[in-house]
Amino acid sequence: MRENHKTLPVVEKLSNAEETVWINLKKLPSAKKDLEISMADIDDAEARLERFAPFIMKCFPETKKDNGLIESALVPIPKMKRCLEETYKTSIPGALFLKKDSHLAVAGSVKARGGIYEVLKHTEELALAAGLISTADDYAKLAEPKCREFFSQYTIQVGSTGNLGLSIGIASAAVGYKVIVHMSADARQWKKDMLRNHGVTVIEYASDYSEAVKEGRRLSDEDPKSYFVDDENSVNLFMGYAVAAKRLKKQFNDQNISVDDTRPLFVYIPCGVGGAPGGVTFGLKEIWGDNVHCFFIEPVQAPAMLLGMATGLHNEISVQDIGLTGQTHADGLAVGRPSGFVGKVMEPLLSGEFTVSDKKLYDYMRALLDAEEIFIEPSACAAFEGPVKLLACEETKEYIKKNGLERVMENAAHIVWATGGSLVPEEIRKEYKNIYLDEPVKYRLI
Ligand SMILES: *Cc1c(COP(=O)(O)O)cnc(C)c1O
């Protein structure tokens, strides 16, 4: 079976670690999709986050200004748009925006959406079952010492390349849980240090992300008072991410941005195991249907989701199976095997994918700093590959034509989803700024 897939042109390109564009031919018109999850699930997640807002405000005072909602700004980045057009000799018709999940409160990454949501959902279940609260109560109660003491009998565990661990670790420690984070070899030292400072137990693995998840799941299953946040299969994480779409709709209304037949929306999201970009995409498609076009971006050495979707094998194939290393400077995207759950949900929804070389991540990072004075981490910069390549590749130009968008591209809004960065310490930022991967010097991974 695998031999067959190796003859697919896109797999051959991926296996050579070439920058690749892939259009998803299984995408369906929104009226025809048939999924088991729906807007009602997103509404449920949104309502739960609202119930927890008083608690979030109490634990994380920085969220007071947003009444306990953890949400990020949507900002136009016209100077970056010009810079990309000039540097990469392309055009990006319409307006370019940055969705700053890089600056989300508490966790400084998109993981603040899914990770914190799942910890809160589990907390609500335990608290309701123990009679500590009813859903009509003010959840600020849950921050009282007697509740913290109750939660301290329980453990939360998670496998992570870094940012999910940060999000789950910080949120769980705030509730009062014991927390164990299983970190893959790709996780950066400063992320482990930060977690340990929050009282989190960090177990380090010499192996990759899939192994860290497997071992974490095993250890958690052995303990009846332990709950495992399963990044590869969790519907809760996914719904936490999906709430982003409803919040974005409000921001669009506030900023007078419309999305319809003549004003398409393009969204570019960096992808690791798939939960974050998948959840956001699911939400966006529920709201804007055929008028939103979602693309994922992965590193050339770790195109797990693209490989799984293009072959139809999903989590039954890994990037190592086609001779790639899975290693990348984009630590948040260093995943060799995708979520099978997310890949299958994405089949009728996703427009396509791009892969990007590590070198460009640092170039995009410096360009955004110079043009707009915004820092985001290298993994998050992968998303810029989308608008840069959209009109520079035959495959995507064909996509635009087929979808009847040529005449309306001037009205398009493009959103680069900045997935992380604000927690990166100053000295690490300085190091990043000086990494030029085209120079003969070999840089160590920080
Ligand atoms: C985790 C992460 C992603 C991708 O999310 P997945 O759910 O793993 O696909 C993208 N960017 C950053 C910075 C991340 O930490």
Image (cartoon, helix red, strand yellow):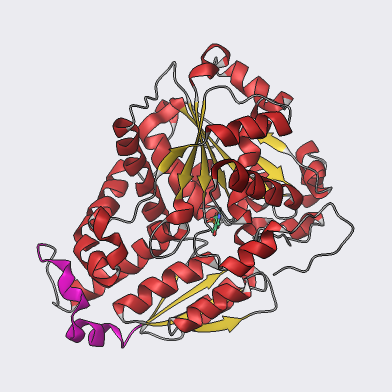
Is 237 placed above or below 245 here?
Answer: below
Q: Residue furthest left?
A: 136
The quadrant where ligand 1 appears is bottom right
Q: Residue 33: image x %, image y %? A: 44, 33
Q: How many numbered marks does the figure carry? A: 0
Q: Which residue is drawn at 44% across and 48% down?
A: 279
Q: What stretch is highlighted in magenta?
A: 136-154
Would you say residue 144 sits in the magenta stretch?
yes
Seen from the viewer's position, the closer of residues 116 and 25 is 116
Establish if 349 lies above or below 235.
above
Residue 388: give x, y in percent of width and height. 66, 33
Q: Is residue 444 left or right of residue 72?
A: right
Does residue 63 appear to the left or right of 277 in the view shown?
left
Q: Which residue is drawn at 54% across and 37% down?
A: 350
Q: Is residue 25 visible?
A: no
Name the one closer to the observer, 107 or 344. 107
Give the residue at x 36% y 75%. Answer: 172
The picture places residue 193, in percent across and down from the top left corner, at: 55, 80
Q: Name the residue: 54% across, 42% down.
A: 372
Q: In which quarter of the image is the C terminus?
A: bottom right
Residue 105 seen by the camera: yes
Give 20 or 346, whichever is nearer the viewer. 20
Does 234 sit above or below residue 373? below
Tell me where residue 169 sits by quadrant. Answer: bottom left
Query: Residue reaching furthest top?
Result: 407
Q: Is the magenta stretch mostly helix, strand or loop?
A: helix
Image spot of residue 343 (x, y percent): 55, 48
- Please check the rendered image and state whether residue 51 is part of the magenta-colored stretch, yes or no: no
